Amino acid sequence: MGKFFNDILPQHKLFIEKQHLFFVGTAPLDLDGHVNLSPKGMDCFYVFSPTRVAYMDIVGSGNETSAHLLENGRITFMFCAFDGPPNILRLYGKGYTVLPGDSEWQLLSPHFKLLLVTRQIIVADIDKVQTSCGFSVPFYGYEGERDQAEKWALNKGESGLEAYKKEKNLVSIDGLPTALYKR
């Protein structure tokens, strides 16, 4: 039932644009390291081309994706249909982190609704696309986006956010440095 493609086709892009939720998977090289799987929302994903995507990443309690990408670049995205016809779409590739102040930031950031809580943009060059049936994915109804992250960021303020990132976002749970570490 699963089909593989070398590029993101127009129908894949349309499917991605309709989804309110996607998942990002990364892992360290160390076999004892922790695999990371993160849910993402907030309409933060953008398809730049049939082989390049990016998403706006917000400050969180960890920064595993950035650490894993810095170490080995491997990344997988998964989109699931929670309404309409069943479908699962996976994008496999190599990624990297772009931080505010990096030269690429000015090219990428206009494609996103940047927030106070925006931490970085994750970019990935896609080398394989997979669709599969999604027959066992249940139906779920979309009710809207949560606003807690932005309220939390407003409460912390810019200096509080910088302090929080220095405390929580410089290394992974396995001790790997993130892109923020080099700052």
Image: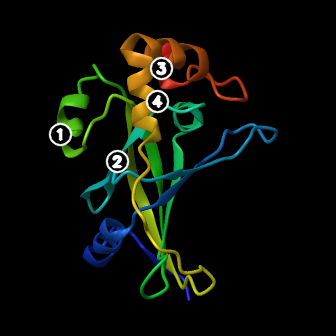
Instruction: Determine which residue is flagged by label 2.
Output: 54
Q: Which residue is mark 4?
A: 152
Relative side of 112 to 135, left or right: left
The residue depicted at 23 percent of the width and 36 percent of the height is 109
Residue 180's disc is 3
Type of amino acid under label 4 = Trp
Residue 33 at x, y = what percent? 76, 37
Q: Local crowd at mark 1 within 10 Å, few (<14), some, or many (≥20)? A: few
Per the model, the C-alpha gap separating discs 1 and 3 is 21 Å
Identified at 45% across, 81% down, the residue is 83
Q: Which residue is mark 1?
A: 110
N-term-proximal mark, 3 vs 4:
4
- Of the numbered discs 3 and 2, the one sitting upstream in the chain is 2
- Figure coloring: rainbow
Amino acid under disc 1: Pro
Q: Are marks 1 and 4 in contact (CB under 8 Å)?
A: no
Asked where in the image residue 117 lies, by quadrant, the reply is top left
Which is in the foreground here, disc 1 or disc 2? 1
Looking at the image, residue 50 sits to the left or right of residue 79; the answer is left
Q: Is residue 36 above or below residue 78?
A: above
At which x and y percent is residue 30? Answer: 75, 37
- The nearer-to-camera label among 4 and 2 is 4
Label 3, label 2: how far apart the Cα atoms are: 18 Å
Do tag 3 and tag 2 residues touch (Cβ < 8 Å)?
Answer: no
Q: Amino acid at mark 3?
A: Leu
